[in-house]
Amino acid sequence: MLLLEAGSEIPLVHPESAEGVFGLLFLVIALPLAGAAILLLGGKYTDKWGHLLGTAMPVGSFAISVVLFLQMLGRDEGERQIGQHLYDWVQVGNLDIGMDLLLDPLSALFLLLITGVGSLIHVYSIGYMSHDPRRRRFFGYLNLFVAAMLMLVLSENYLGLFLGWEGVGLASYLLIGFWQHKPSAAAAAKKAFVINRVGDMGMALAIFLAFALFGSTSFSVISAGAGEASETAMTALGVLLLIGACGKSAQFPLQAWLLDAMEGPTPVSALIHAATMVTAGVYLIIRSNFVFEYAPDAQTVVVVIAAISILWGAVIGCAKDDIKKALAGSTMSQIGYMMLGAGLGVAGYAYAIFHLITHGFFKANMFLGAGSVMHGMDDDVDMRHYGMLQKAMPVTFATFLMGYLAIIGFPGFSGFWSKDKIIETAIAENWVVGLAALLGAGVTGFYMTRLMLMTFFSQKRWQKDVHPHESPAVMTFPLIVLAALSVLGGVLILGDWIKTWLKPVVGEAEHHEPPLPAIVITAIIVAVVAVGVAIAFVIYQRQKVPAVAPDDVSFATRAARNELYGNEINEALVVGPGRRLVAGLFLFDRHGADGTFMGGGSAVKAIGGQLRKVQTGYVRSYALSVLVGVLIVVAAMLAVNL
């Protein structure tokens, strides 16, 4: 475990009360929450202007977030933690939890990302969902999603975080299954909901354990007492938190819901992958740094899960022809890099957040770009039906290109600075993990170049009666802004600003020198990515791409197409045994428990049924019974006298 610098221990400073402009903190959540309430309860009366209200609410939250961030910049490092107590929430016995908010350097960055990117996605949705008769409801769900995520990152305690955590899960269920008339969308929503409940059980148990250990769910209380708890207890707490994080962030082994979630409208995909949902797990791990710094074994598990997820998602991205699912596999891999940074401890926390922010820019850019492509291709998602779209859709192409260069780590673009820093830190801490991250970078270069070539270059493979065209300005404007951020997002690394800014929250580690000079490691990373790009170019640009995926492929390709059989593994290890267990319990309940407790009643009922046969209602039958009885008594008396 990395040691913190003297004088910068993990326990949080007790936040001062919000006053002045910081008193507006609650409005950041309240605005989109109010928007959701108005749009979902207002009914058809809000149909005409609901999309405008739904967009205005996160824009308002973004404006407040910018003001709060600028105010924090003007404060000294030790004064950048502001708390706001709204009301007493839970008071039962020793459990006293307030509805408390915490604005600090970590949550301030998340506010800007969630409200900024979220607002652009709302603007884009005005055009994308313009012909949907339920557009007003869609914007209500989007507002609910944003409000829940803001609650998650602003809460000062785990219970409040869990409230937002479950709100995000509910909103994702509603949005993934928004087109519930499609059986695939309804099934995808249910799948996401169920798998996330598995992770949520880990999260709930972590909260129970935290209260049992520290008598509180407050971050400041737990961080202050973390050093007093046993390493075993802290390891258990860390692993339970990780289970929750794996569910929300679609990390191995709870990743199977992520690609199916692409059944929702494309703006939902962008919101889930860039500003909400999948970033929640990374936030949880880094917010809980005071747990993991006292649980080195739990940190190791985080690193292992992250390394597997990096490669798992990258391999899936290599074989998917659905443009959104290829990007979804990419998200699993990129979130893996963030989790890797978080698992590396104090040395990697800041870089994990750095990559989370840049990823929010370029992944939102590419998902919305994919939606623009679908808009111009009659909602076809199959890249094998694309090709040569760069001239038909010039704005979409140019903006998507910026996102592509950022994610592969092209020098100068945002992903180059953020992802390379994680790989460099990983190599310095553990060369095996570093090599896994390096390999993932090379595979990223391959699958993203494949996606780029199949969509905008190679050969024209358009289906009959399809006429590609550029999207309206309301959709391309967010693409242009996000493309610019994809290029310029790397400025956060200048002067190590991101590390200095987050130091009050995550501390600062002693410097570990990598085995090679940083410039050499950077050159190696760029070279590995270039190899991946070159291989993709040879396969998908210089050779003809078939309009239908061939069946005679290798086992590796089939496995990648089937998401490395993640669904089959879940079926064999969890779903199938679970179904059989439930069936067995049902039989036991039906024939065992019910038979035991209801057997007495059944016996009495059976005896009564037999006795009822004697009661015929005929006088002659009763007279005959009396005669037989008399004869029996007489016979008995004679037998005794003899």
Image (tube, rainbow, N blue to C red):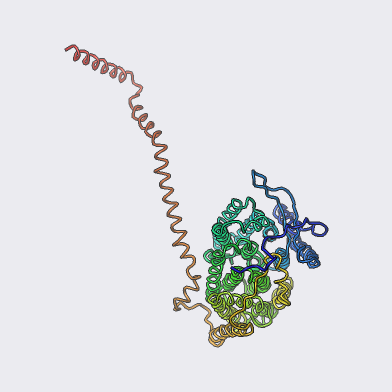
Is residue 87 found left or right of 287 in the rendered image?
A: right
Q: Residue furthest bottom?
A: 542
Q: Residue furthest top?
A: 641
Which residue lies at the image location 44% right of the left edge and 76% below the top edge? 555
Q: Residue furthest front?
A: 6
In x, y percent, where is residue 229?
A: 59, 56
Is residue 476 found left or right of 379 in the rendered image?
A: right
Which residue lies at the image location 19% right of the left edge and 11% below the top edge? 641
Kindly tell me whether residue 205 is visible in this rendering.
Answer: yes
Q: How many marks?
A: 0
In x, y percent, where is residue 468?
A: 65, 77
Kindly tell me whether residue 189 is visible in this rendering.
Answer: no
Is residue 560 found left or right of 204 in the rendered image?
A: left
Compared to residue 629, the image places residue 561 above or below, namely below
Q: Foreground residue, 490 or 42?
A: 490
In x, y percent, where is residue 363?
A: 65, 72
Q: Quadrant of residue 341?
A: bottom right
Q: Quadrant of residue 55?
A: bottom right
Q: Foreground residue, 67 or 19?
A: 19
Q: Quadrant of the N terminus?
A: bottom right
Q: Quadrant of residue 473?
A: bottom right
In x, y percent, where is residue 112?
A: 73, 66
Compared to residue 112, the image places residue 39 above or below, namely above
Compared to residue 81, the image places residue 96 above or below, namely above
Q: Residue furthest right?
A: 20
Q: Quadrant of the C terminus?
A: top left
Is residue 520 found left or right of 605 in the rendered image?
A: right
